[in-house]
Structures are given as C-alpha cells and as structure tokens.
Amino acid sequence: GIYNSNQDFLKIKTNAKVLKLDVNSSGKSIKGVEAEIDGDKWLFSSDVVILAAGAINTPIILLNSKSSSHPNGLGNSSNMVGKNLMNIQMTCILQRANNLTSGYFPKSLGLNDFYFGDKNVNFPLGHIQTGGGVLRDAFFAESPPVLSLITRFIPDFGLKNLAKRSISWWAMTEVLPDPENAVTIQNNRVKINYIHNNLEAHDRLVYRWLDTLKVIENNPLSVSITQTPAHPRGLAPLSIVGYSCGTCKMGNDPKTSVVNKNGKCHDIDNLYIADASIFPSCPSIGHGLTVIALSLKLGDYLTSGNLYKPLICRP
C-alpha cells in the first residue's frame, strides 16, 4: 500500500478520472481540479496542484484544460505540451536454457557495456537486461512478433514448457526528442503520432547482443544455455507506454519548455508536474527511480517553503 495512506491528512480517491484544470480570472493560478468519480462530478481545490498522470495523460489533461487565457491548452504558451514524446526502443530476444526454470523468476542481470558505444562506433547503443522468466515478463507478452513466431511452430501445446526452458533478454535504446512525435487532441479524441528514431543504434545493439549470445553458446564451458540456430525476437509495440517520457519538457526558457527545474509550470504559479513527461531526453533504461527522485525533490521543495495547504474537495 501507500505509506501513511490511513492518516487523516491523506485521502485517496479511487476510480477517479481528472477531466481538466480550471484557472482563476487572471489565468495564472489553478482554482479547481474537475474530476469524475464513480460517475459523479467532483471539484477539488488547493493552493498547490501537482499533476503526475504520466507522459501520455499529463499532456492530455493540460490540452483539455484550454480556456480564454490559455487557448492552446494549459501551460502551453511554448506550444510544447504533448510534443517530443519518447518511448524507449525495446526488442525482446529469446534464448534457450538447459536448466528447467519456473518461468516466473525476476530480472537478475543488466549491463551497460554498449551504453556509450562499441567497437567501430562512438555513439550510444543502449542497455541490455534480462526480462526475467518469460511467463512473468509482461513486456514479452506484449510483443506479438515474438509470440507469433513461436506459436507458429507449436500451435497446439508446449508454449509453457518452452517458456520454462527459455530466457528473455531486452535490448533497450534511447530515442531522441522530436516535436513531430506528439500527443494531441483532435475532434475530442486522443491522437498519438509516433515514429521511432535512432534506429541504427538499436539495430546495432540487437545484433551485437545476438553475436554475444552465439559466442557464449559455442563456448564448451557453457552449461546453462543451449546452442540454437535462431533467437526469436520482436520489437515492443507503442502500446507499451510504461517508459514513455518527454511531453512536458523541463527547461529554463519558457519559450521552449513547459516547466522549470523544480517542475513548476512556467505559465501557472501553483501547478507542478512530477512524472516522466518533464524529461528533456530519454534514457536507455527504466526511469522509475528518476521519477521517484524528482518527486522527492519536489516534495522537499514545497514543504520547506510552506507552499501548500490541505486539499479541499466537494462533489
């Protein structure tokens, strides 16, 4: 559960969807947060509002909060809200194992040997990590090319047994910020325009790791894995958005960014963003710990300055 979730000073509303943020007459401060909870409309108000809905939903909320003082969406004077969507390129690679596993073991290995380049290249390639047991790896399950290739050869049975004798690897490469990759609202519908870039780096990483696996498999001292003629693999689809970032860029210049170094929206005095949408660049590894660190930093900043008061809400 959430620490202190049973304390009087903290109330958690479940089955809630934030619809929009309302500004005051000056357009410089949030006066209310409109939400829908179990079919009922609620209005929340507070001296400080922190938006942490993720790199997809945070810009959606801001774009849906347009008003006469913010005709292009809340906090969007830079026209950067929703722009520069980045989602780590991830390819799942399957390797056969000699030893029977449960298929549910956790991740146990990660390496950055190719993070800053490789022989013959001086640009970053990315990160390699085990996905854990194939039956536990949610990303593997969301990679249709991998599963379709495997099930083509074993359509009736055996997939679970194969998973118990397999290891999944993830090759992960950063993508670069591009304003054409964006989350937008068109005709009241969310639209995501996205094309992977930095493809050469990712391709080099995948094939470099395939070569590494083959070298290990051909080593007579290797006893845990099996030499195989092919390693089924597939690129994770855009529907896996857990590693998305960049849509409300952090920066010092209000003309080219949405929030400042503390996560405060340049255009709004009491609005802060505390999720991966503020990342100006995309890492090659999961950024959950970085988001946690930014949130803790923001919490310290707000509490040390006594910038907040208890939340008030009413249906």
Image: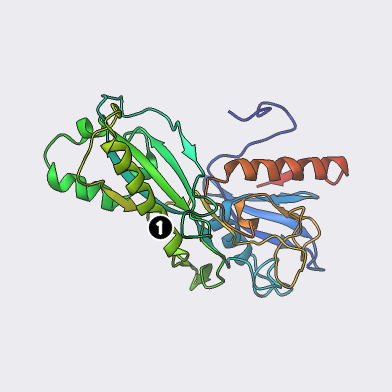
Residue occupying image coordinates x 63% and y 66%? 81
Q: Indicate left or right for 315 with 161 as reference.
A: right
Does any portion of residue 141 appear in the rendered image?
no
Placement of 243 over or under 5, stated as above or below? below
Placement of 219 over or under 232, stated as above or below? above
Does any portion of residue 76 appear in the rendered image?
yes
Q: Indicate left or right for 281 with 10 as reference.
A: left
Residue 216: image location, x then y, percent: 32, 37
- Residue at far right of view: 305
Residue 15: image location, x then y, percent: 53, 42
* Residue of label 1: 204
Residue occupying image coordinates x 86% and y 40%? 304
Badge 1 amino acid: Arg
Q: Indicate left or right for 81 with 299 as reference.
A: left
Q: Nearer the viewer, residue 123 or 9?
A: 123
Q: Nearer the viewer, residue 16 or 262?
A: 262
Residue occupying image coordinates x 88% and y 44%? 305
Q: Quadrant of residue 290?
A: top right
Q: Nearer the viewer, residue 209 or 255?
A: 209
Residue occupying image coordinates x 63% and y 56%? 279
Looking at the figure, which quarter contains the N terminus? top right
Q: Nearer the viewer, residue 72 or 254?
A: 254
Placement of 168 over or under 263, stated as above or below? above
Q: Quadrant of residue 96?
A: top left
- In terms of secondary structure, where does tag 1 sit? helix
Residue 107: image location, x then y, percent: 44, 33
